[in-house]
Image (cartoon, rainbow, N blue to C red):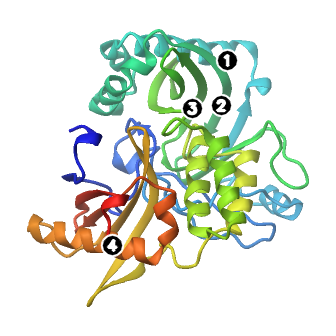
Amino acid sequence: MERLKTKILHWLGAISPGGNPLQVDCSQPFPPTLNLNSVRLKQRKLNPAFSNSIKAKAEFNMNLARSLTPALWIALALSPLSVRAQSCQTSSDLDDATRTAITTAAQRYFGMATKGDVASMRQNAVPNLASDFSGIEGTIKDRERDLAAAQATVKGVFLLDGSTPSPHAEFYCGVFGKSGQTANSAVFYLDNLPAGKYGVVLLDANSPQGHTLFSLILQQEGTDWKIGGLYVKSAQVAGHDSDWFLARAREYKTKSQMHNAWFYFTQARLLMSPLPFMGTLATDKMADEMQSAQPADLPVGKTVDLPAGTATYKLISIFPQAVGNDLDLIVKYQAADISNTNQIYATNVAVMKALATKYPEVRDAFAAIVARAVDPTGRDYGTLLAMKDIK
């Protein structure tokens, strides 16, 4: 259904239990309990108190990686070996043979993707991924126009070495300064990562269709590097890149439109990093800037009540998302049952009206609002209304 031909859009589908956005194409690199998409991004402030971790695929509430103080590095160095079972090497740290093997494999798989050769990609995937390759097949099909005739440039190579399985693996890559991350450093947070060696290869793919971020997670099997995961996303949303969204966020902040500022900071952050479980100096700086713009009344790491007439709804999350060339605002809320779609449609409309009333500034920043009622099983029912039709 074309966006311009409809004012209201409904859909029913399975989502994550938290009812949250999928901002990148994720290929299910491991079974659900061993999935690289289930990642942690710890907020590390300049003190010894680490905040609770979150799962990027589930909530991605922008509690991003922070730097470690010298005291924390000393504590880490004195910690038991099991805690320090992960290590990371950047491209400049690797010997020529290892670097060449990883990058050559990644470029070969990229070539397969540009041709839509998912059969060959599946043959070169780790067994758990090859047994259910539908995620990658869907990703390649969805990005067919973007990848066709694309030329790739290697932007980063990392070797993650996890000697033992870890429920919360953390990899610190590159040189860190006294204030934490530097221009060439990176941090990766991965949940339930099996023991092994993993190559992370970041590719910039340019084609007549635009700029695409193509990232591979490769797992070493003998002398081969097999596909363990694939992440593909556009470097732009609704025709704009992260710098544009960052500039708009700062403008909204200057105007004291803190909700719009937060949403646009969120979108800028999502575009800035090719991987949801990767932190860099740039993302750390943005996270610092975002903290001062975070409104207390948004469902960030918590539910928030939204009064709507005689009813009150518990909001799960609010986030921006591109629909075609428009940027829409998605709101997800708890619902006991979504089987009566007529009733849920009416409820969705009520939630959208209440949201636009509570946050009137969003009318100028978004083309539409999408309300999605989420039942206890994680299934949802959504309704879209153009902003001009929300009275």
SS category of the residue bearing label 2: strand
From this view, report whether residue 175 is shown above or below residue 335: above
Q: Nearer the viewer, mark 4 or mark 2?
A: 4
**Decide: marks 1, 2 in contact (CB < 8 A)?**
yes
Of 124 and 46, nearer the camera is 46
Q: Which residue is mark 1?
A: 98
**Amino acid at pointer 3:** Tyr
First in residue order: circle 1 vs circle 2: 1
Determine the CA span between mark 1 and mark 2: 9 Å
Position of 259 compared to 48: left or right?
Answer: left
Give neighbour class at mark 2: few <14, some 14-19, many 20+ (Cα, 10 Å). Answer: many
First in residue order: circle 1 vs circle 4: 1
Q: Residue at x 64, y 57 (%)?
A: 64
First in residue order: circle 4 vs circle 2: 2
Query: Where, by quadrant of the figure, is residue 185 drawn?
Result: top right
**Amino acid at pointer 1:** Thr
Report if residue 177 is visible in the image: yes
SS category of the residue bearing label 1: helix
Q: Residue at x 46, y 59 (%)?
A: 319
Determine the CA span between mark 3 and mark 2: 6 Å
Of 385 and 191, nearer the camera is 385
**Decide: marks 3, 2 in contact (CB < 8 A)?**
yes
Residue 198 - label: 3
Residue 353 - label: 4
Determine the CA span between mark 4 and mark 2: 49 Å
Q: Residue at x 45, y 30 (%)?
A: 230
**Amino acid at pointer 4:** Lys
Q: Which residue is mark 2?
A: 159
Q: Residue at x 25, y 68 (%)?
A: 348
**Decide: marks 4, 2 in contact (CB < 8 A)?**
no
